[in-house]
Image (cartoon, coloured by chain):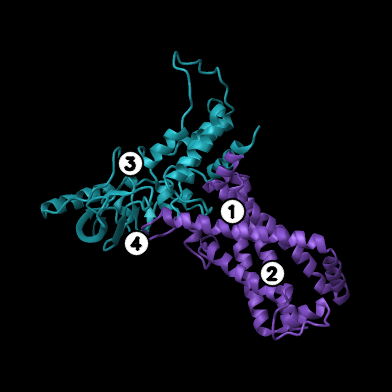
Amino acid sequence: MGATTDTSNETIDLTIKVWRQSGPDDRGEFRTYDLKGVSTHMSFLEMLDVLNEQLLAGDEEPVAFDHDCREGICGMCGMVINGQAHGPDRETTTCQLHMRRFNDGDTIVIEPWRATAFPVIRDLVVDRSAFDRIIEAGGFVSVNTGNPPDANAILVPKDDAEQSMNAAACIGCGACVAACKNASAMLFVGAKVSHLALLPQGKPERKQRANDMVAQMDKEQFGSCTNTYECEAACPAGISVENIARLNREYLRSLLPF
Amino acid sequence: MNRLLFALRSSIGRKLVMGVTGLLLCGFLVAHLAGNFLLYVGPDAYNEYADTLHKQKLLLAIAELGLLVLFLMHIYLAISTGKDNKTARSQTYDRKQTKIESNSQGIFKAWPENWMFVSGALVLGFIILHLIDFRMEFRPDITYEGKEPFEKAVMLLKNPITATVYFAGTLLLGVHLTHGVASAFQSLGTSNQWTQKCFKWFSIIFGVGISLGFASFPVWALFK
């Protein structure tokens, strides 16, 4: 794969090998479809739309896949394309991947995120509510309701704000879990813990937060981090593994009595 | 206390203890290599070092027990986290490809980090053989009696099969360390973007240094 030939004004013929699973209890299997005349201007999800039209015309169930904004912002879409979470491009979600990245005659293998914590609901759709439960466990700050405070009442050093915002860029798509050989959620939890722990508003609850979010992460059966950093390479939001080190630090700090 | 025990059983807690035990074992490797380098100084220096060491019976017993505990903890945690990691992905991918550019090319293809369990298990096997040879003095083909430590070491390492096993074992140890040291620092939460690169390089240099240091002894003994 890779941009070896200029296919910007062409259509390409593809073989799509896609995971089909009718429900959570179905064993599931790969099915192969031929797709002809795919415009190289299409996004990957538009290519799947075309495939689904073809399937519907042939009285076959369309391939279920998650999507929402199709602008690379929401974190809904996500599938493993030719063994890579969100496909071959760095810092790109599936919806922002375009068919010009593929060549005429290619076979594209499409699989759902594979993790025990992300059970398959149907075809390429997985249940990512484990992430929601981790956030519920501590990914918030407790504040009194009322009038908004003055904008500059709490001063935040620029470096801290930058690092916090970088961590907050996580869209919770789950690519980190999909790419990790241990299906670990450390990059996601690291980003969520970091973006709050770095700000003054998040500091009062930092110990409880690290403890509770890690406990929930383990309960959801995500694996542990063996520091291979595949998560960072697969992350469409460019979240750094520095956040994993910070999570480890925050967790260690939560054990100290002072 | 209960909270601490609970935390140490968590995925992060276990990796943390694994990192600490690994780094302490690295400290032992440095001391062990430094002592072994006396082989190059000559029989007198090495024998004197070995005799002085063996006279400290109590200290030696404590050190050996400490090392055994460190090894057992490190191994237990590797098995325990490894088992959980297998459970975390019950169904594997049909196709899996890295997105780290440097890992998708070259001869190494990031294999030290992806083969930590296997390299660790092979190193354990090598350590058991090493203990049978030098600590228990249990090799049936070798006459240990009446020989000084220097003579015993040369005699053991002169055997071509032993030399090959020791050479391969120490190289595997190096492979394990090139990822293990940097990984331990990350698990301890000590790295940021800049120090992470430093730890990675330190880890490679440390792994290669320790490996070549130990691997040099069987090569030296063959020409002795």
Of labels 4 and 1, earlier in sequence is: 4
Chain A color in figure? cyan
Asked if residue A146 lies left or right of residue B52, the reply is left
> Separation of disc 3 and disc 4 at Cα?
23 Å
Q: Is residue B169 left or right of residue B65?
A: left
Name which residue type carries label 3: Met
What amino acid does circle 2 point to?
A: Leu
Chain (purple): B
Q: Which residue is mark 4?
A: B94
Dot 2 or dot 1: first in sequence order is 1
What's the mark number on residue A76? 3
Question: The C terminus of chain A lies in which quarter of the figure?
Answer: top right
- The residue indicated by pointer 1 is B183
- The answer to which of A184 and B142 lies nearer the viewer is B142
Residue B73 visible somewhere in the drawing: yes
Residue A194, can we see it?
Answer: no
